[in-house]
Amino acid sequence: MKIDPYLFFEGRCEEAMAFYQQALGARVEFMMRYSESPEPPPPGMLPPGSEHKIMHASLHIGGALVMMSDGMCSGSPSFKGFSLSLDCPEADAAREAFAALAGGGHVRMPLAKTFWAPLFGMVEDRFGVSWMVGVSDDAK
């Protein structure tokens, strides 16, 4: 079994994809807009003008697959009760990723040494996604 996160950006998915490509070097594996679907969404499911929003996309961020969508295009994404954990190979990479994710977002816990890691911090990005960024103890 495998678990992959699936995030619903409620209308800001394309913007989020571009942000993660720039901030984390994410690579787009797949993207389909609602207008490209072989079966159109049921009438009334999406607000008018949402045809070109993202129905499904998948990105590779490091070794992880993160899937995402514009969902129902409500304009109100809600990312509560979880964080994505980004384990960096060394301190400079963690500092760079943390600074990029913090751009337009909110630092919840600055990067610092902890009892469990040489460097760890928490940040909420500009879309409201919570990230835990760190360097593992076994990193060289």
Image: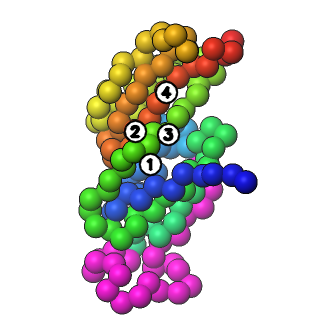
Residue stretch rendered in magenta on the structure: 27-51
- Crowdedness near tag 3: few (<14), some (14–19) or many (≥20) residues, C-alpha within 10 Å: some
- Crowdedness near tag 2: few (<14), some (14–19) or many (≥20) residues, C-alpha within 10 Å: many
Residue type highlighted by circle 2: Ser
Q: Position of residue 40 (x, y in %)?
A: 47, 86
Residue type highlighted by circle 4: Val
Image quadrant where one finds the N terminus: bottom right
In the rendered structure, find residue 133 and report the number of the disc placed on it: 4
Query: According to the image, label 3 marks what residue?
Result: 84
In the rendered structure, find residue 130 and report the number of the disc placed on it: 2
Query: According to the image, label 1 marks what residue?
Result: 18
In what element is the residue under mark 3? strand
**CA distance separating discs 1 and 3:** 18 Å
Question: What residue sits 40% from the left and 64% below the top?
Answer: 70
In the rendered view, tell whether residue 93 sits above or below residue 56.
above
Relative side of 97 to 27, left or right: left
**CA distance separating discs 2 and 1:** 17 Å
Q: Nearer the viewer, mark 4 or mark 1?
A: 4
